[in-house]
Amino acid sequence: MNGYWNSLENWGSYLQCVTDALSGKANLELEHTQQSPGIWSLHPIPKDVTIIPPCWLGKQVSLGSGCLIGPYTLLESGTEIGPRALVQRSVLLSGSKAGRRSTLHGTILCPNSAAEQDTVLHEGVVLGDGAAAKERAV
């Protein structure tokens, strides 16, 4: 059988699947047009935002001034990234938020969850639907 296979057993295999899709290993249609090589977005990227490809940005994603996104980051529709936040190798699902100066690496935010201001979430953190990591949490 030709194609891509990844058993989604845990958060790590889920992030690996996203990484494989963004890098082209999974050979998927990523739906949006590329704003530049490796950056899929329906909207232009603000000039005061840094995107390191590959990244995929859904509809109505809000990117705060001075934030840095990527590589290997997927932001679903309605996600918000606060000013000066850093989000790398992470998945933020619909309506989730990374607050001002928050740092997310290897993190999954389920729908409507939040990493509040100055929060640091390391590899393996998964916030469930509607959950919040409060201000300055590590």
Image (tube, rainbow, N blue to C red):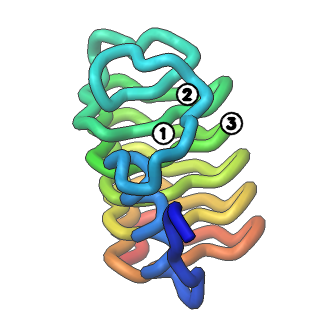
Q: Which mark is residue 12?
A: none
Q: Is residue 98 above or below residue 46?
A: below
Closest to the observer, 79 or 41: 41
Please tell me which residue lies in front, 54 or 51.
54
The numbered disc on residue 81 is 1
5 to 32, vertically: above or below: below
Residue labelled with disc 3: 77
For label 3, count other residues whose C-alpha is less than 10 Å away and answer few (under 14), some (14-19) or many (20+). Answer: some
Q: Residues within 10 Å of mark 1 (few under 14, many from 20)?
A: many
- Per the image, the residue denoted by label 2 is 62
Disc 1 residue type?
A: Ile
- Please state the horizontal and vertical placement of residue 77, each as a whole percent of the image: 68, 36
Mark 2 vs mark 3, CA separation in Å: 9 Å
Amino acid on which the number 3 mark rests in the picture: Ser
Query: Mark 1 vs mark 2: which is more N-terminal?
Result: 2
Q: Residues within 10 Å of mark 2 (few under 14, many from 20)?
A: some
Image check: 117 left or right of 42? left
Q: How many marks?
A: 3
